Amino acid sequence: MARSTTLFGIAGAVAIGSAFTILSSLGKRSLLTVVASGIALLVFASTRHIQLLSRRSPKRNARLQVNASSQAVRRPPMDYNLFVLGSGGHTKEMLMMMDDGSHDFTNFHRRYLISSGDAMSENHLEEYEDGLKTLCKSHKSSPGTYDKRIVTRARKVHQPLWSTPLTALLSILDIFPALLVPPDSEAGKKLRYPSRVFSNGPATGFFVALAIHLLKMFYLAPESSMKVVYIESWARISTLSLTGKLLLHTGIADVFVVQHEEVALRYGVQNAGEIVFNSRRLDDIEPSPVKC
Amino acid sequence: MATLQRYCLVTVGATVGFKQLTEQVLLPAFWQFLTSEGFTSLRIQCGPDISWATALLDNRNADIPEGLTVNVFEATKNLMKDEMLLCRAESGVRSTGLVISHAGTGTILDAWKVGLPVIVVPNEELLDNHQAEMATHLASEGYATMSTARYTDLQGAIHKADLLWEENQSRLPPHSVKSQKNASSLRLWEIHPQEVDKEEDARMVND
């Protein structure tokens, strides 16, 4: 926490410094006003930052919403969740975690964030939604609704680190409307903001979490909405990904879990088990003819 | 009755290629072994090494044992749909095949989903990557068999994979696998943040 507050301090100082040079011609009084409001903003921002962080559970563990008596999942009568999809691998894992045989999605809206130029994720996602539709039909339940939002990719694989801030800025400009414009469905209109935002490792996931943090910092979105649920990629057995490290050190995720014991112990975070293997298999979907 | 088809799929990933592995599975000695194990088709996805592999295969066309077809291809849009389904058993047509794969997570997850025996071959030339770690993990959990790229090791691994496959079939009937293996893992839809107040209450109760 101290580290990120320092970061804010530095950013603020830089902003004030540049304001100095630009406005030095405007005379002493206006200069003082600018400095004063700059400091006020800085104090406000860091206070809100610390306030938001302190209201989260310190270990970022998951709470399971399970009905103790019936073991059935309790879910709100209406829900809207957002899923940050990354490149092929991340998307595949996310969809496998979602495809666990759950089939009650009445009044449930899913919004997907897809990086520009990622046709593969889009294909996988349509396949998942088709499968869900079939599953729900066989259970005579509703698959709910979904929509897609395309955002500029925060960081391409192997893109040099120095140019990342530029593409990240473009990406964050697309992220805000994706978070703020409610989907055109019943659940979306009623709820306005997603209740949970899921991510599992792509760089975009960090920028989505950052955008949400900023919105809450300046009271532009309610603190009770858009809870960031970060599930580290199943591929990370002993170390966290860059996105994982950033989220862990800044503390801006509401839930932070990993899928292997080794990485959980190394960073002192919760091991949620291999969630990807909750997925339905082909035999569950279309039973194969007798095995030979 | 005609003999059953049996497919062996070798896949190295779309971007880097894995020449050591491609080279070994293109050896006539390996083909002989596959034939003796009842395989009828060997399909090799070799990525950027495609032209080299095609030339090599053309040279050795005469050495392909009877009853086996060998194909090389660069990549496919959907490896699971296009290729892995051929490795799936179908009554009276095909027996369960085999996937020999680099330790890429996408391929491994797909093979798990289709329900196929897998041999993982970590690419040791790729430094700073987690392939060996992943392969070890999969082997220790009983999801896959690990091997080096050498064809003699691959042959041993194919025997082992068959045994592991049979063992898994009898030990873990298809539908209880999920509940047994993953009794401890959380379900995505049930993950919610903890609220600080509630946690404090719980702590007080514990005190």
Image: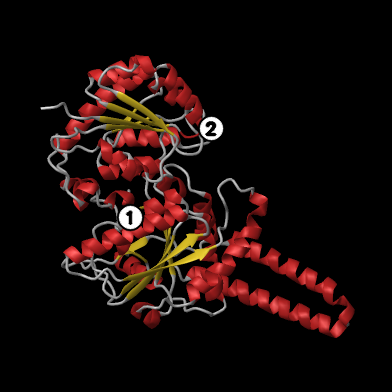
The amino acid type, in three-letter code, at marker 2 is: Leu
- Residue at the image point whose x is 79% and y is 73% from the top: A19
Q: Can residue A50 be seen in this view?
A: no
- Element under label 1? helix
Find disc 2 in the rendering and name its residue. B127
Identify the image quadrant of residue A184.
Answer: bottom left
- Residue at the image point whose x is 26% and y is 43% from the top: B114
- Element under label 2? loop
Q: Nearer the viewer, residue B146 or A149?
A: A149
To which chain does the residue with label 1 belong? A
Q: Where residue A83 sits in the image (x, y, percent)?
A: 41, 63
Report the quarter where the C terminus of chain B lies: bottom left
User: Cβ–Cβ below 8 Å for labels 2 and 1?
Assistant: no
Identify the image quadrant of residue B41.
Answer: top left
Instruction: Report whether A223 appears left or right of A126.
Output: right
Report the quarter where the N terminus of chain B lies: top left
Q: Where residue A199 sits in the image (x, y, percent)?
A: 44, 59
Q: Where residue A245 sits in the image (x, y, percent)?
A: 52, 52
Examine the rendered structure and indicate whether residue B93 appears above or below residue B151: below
Examine the rendered structure and indicate whether residue A26 appears above or below residue B60: below
Examine the rendered structure and indicate whether residue B196 appears above or below residue B59: below
Q: Where residue A221 sits in the image (x, y, percent)?
A: 50, 78
To which chain does the residue with label 2 belong? B
Q: Which of A251 and A135 is in front in this view?
A: A135
The amino acid type, in three-letter code, at marker 1 is: Met
Find disc 1 in the rendering and name its residue. A97
- Residue at the image point whose x is 16% and y is 68% from the top: A69
Estimate how packed mark 1 is, as few (under 14), some (14 to 19) or many (20 or more) residues with alpha carbons within 10 Å.
Answer: many
Estimate how packed mark 2 is, as few (under 14), some (14 to 19) or many (20 or more) residues with alpha carbons within 10 Å.
Answer: few
Examine the rendered structure and indicate whether residue B193 appears above or below residue A188: above
Instruction: Measure how far apart labels 2 and 1 are at the Cα level.
Output: 29 Å
